[in-house]
Image (cartoon, grey):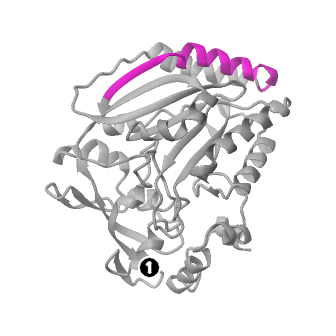
Amino acid sequence: MISLKHLNRVLDVDAKRCTVTVEAGVTINELNENILPSHGLSLINLGSVSGQTVGGIIGTGTHGSGEKFGSFATHVLELVLMKADGTILRCSQQENAEIFSAACCHLGILGIILSVKLQCEAAFMLHEKKASSKLETVLIDLNEHVSSAQHFQFVWFPHTDNVVTIARNRTRRLKLVKNNWFKDIIIGHHLLEFCLWIATFFSSIVPLITSVFFKFCYEGSSECIDRSDKIFNIDCLFKQYVTEWAIPRRHTAIVLREMKNWIENNPDCKIHFPVEVRFVQKDNIMMAPSCEQDVTYIGIISYRPYGKLVPHDKWFTFYENLALKYGGRPHWAKDHKVNSQTFQQIYPNFNKFMKLRSELDPDNLFLNEYWKRILK
């Protein structure tokens, strides 16, 4: 295990061109809270959390949501990679372009990322609007919904038809934050965790929990205006298992309908909310799930209230098989059971990437147990 936590210097900030160059151990939180605000800059798009390092976040295809926005790594302008033998390579679209395409989703097996240059933009506020709706209502007009905001996503509450749409747009308006600590913290976190713990003994109450929490915490509409990263990032609550797959966008509706039908036809399986649905523009990053195709990321969850394991294999296995049926690719940082034979089928560049990996690391210094399992 290699830690880059001390490789954390800011190497350059160009406020005019809106770029920042940092060592790979700098965290996204440090960029959001300290480095970028002091220069009037913001990251262009973010996922739900920001605890990752810059070198780590580009390694797994981490993404946010937005029809015209790619994964986080699409904002990488150049990077510096150290090979297993200590050789230093500078990579960009103009220099070592093939390695650059691979290293922007490096999966931890190409070498050590030493530094990264990121394209940012002038600091901005986001106006977030949330509204409850019905799943079929959203699916019927899905393209219109996705195009209605710069950053659109929605969450579905299994065992119900309920969804919450989330539309985020850049704004010049002033900050507007309405915190409700009782609803958000006491009910939405602590009471929910307690209820889901009770449900580990009486699983039949899960649909009731979902309906009640939707009504009290999510039904209706709300809006918020804040600094971009504070809108992009969310509270992921407590311990959980997650799997997320990038589905070709044209298959979004049919996949969600089949998921809903499966839940209705398998009453013994009680599914935790939410199912998160996000949209990402295609790119040319060799091993990104969004490589060469616009995708919809659909993520499912199984909470571990107070650390207690909740059986979820049947649901996760069904979803994995369903995603594969429609050409899906798993999120590299989340649960999956895919092996190299399947990866060769769903990633046209898989063999090219592995050949490049062997050239950069001929002695397999960076292969870990995860990759040994996949490649065996």
Q: Does the magenta stretch include residue 203?
A: yes
Image coordinates for residue 303, horizontal then vertical, percent: 66, 34
Q: What residue is at 47 percent from the left and 75 percent from the top? A: 111
Question: Is any atom of residue 238 visible in this view?
Answer: no
Dividing the picture into quadrants, the one containing residue 204 is top right
Q: What residue is at 73 percent from the left and 46 percent from the top? A: 319
Estimate how packed mark 1 is, as few (under 14), some (14 to 19) or many (20 or more) residues with alpha carbons within 10 Å. some
Q: What residue is at 46 percent from the left and 54 percent from the top? A: 281
Q: Is residue 350 shown above or below 318?
A: below
Q: Which residue is more in the foreground, 291 or 98?
A: 291
Quarter of the figure with the C terminus: bottom right
Predominant secondary structure, magenta span: helix
Left or right: residue 358 versus residue 128 is right
Part of the protein shown in magenta: 200-225
Q: Which residue is more in the foreground, 23 or 296?
A: 296
Image coordinates for residue 339, horizontal then vertical, percent: 72, 66
Q: Residue furthest left?
A: 16
Dividing the picture into quadrants, the one containing residue 314 is top right
Dividing the picture into quadrants, the one containing residue 13 is bottom left
Image coordinates for residue 240, horizontal then vertical, percent: 63, 38
Q: Number of marks in the image? A: 1
Image coordinates for residue 316, horizontal then vertical, percent: 74, 45
SS under mark 1: helix
Q: Is residue 142 shown above or below 194?
A: below
Q: Is residue 139 shown above or below 336?
A: above
Left or right: residue 225 versus residue 201 is left
Q: Is residue 136 magenta?
A: no
Q: Which amino acid does the dot numbered 1 rest on?
A: Glu
Q: Which residue is more in the foreground, 44 or 25?
A: 44
* Residue beneath disc 1: 98
Left or right: residue 267 versus residue 133 is right
Q: What residue is at 45 percent from the left and 38 percent from the top? A: 152
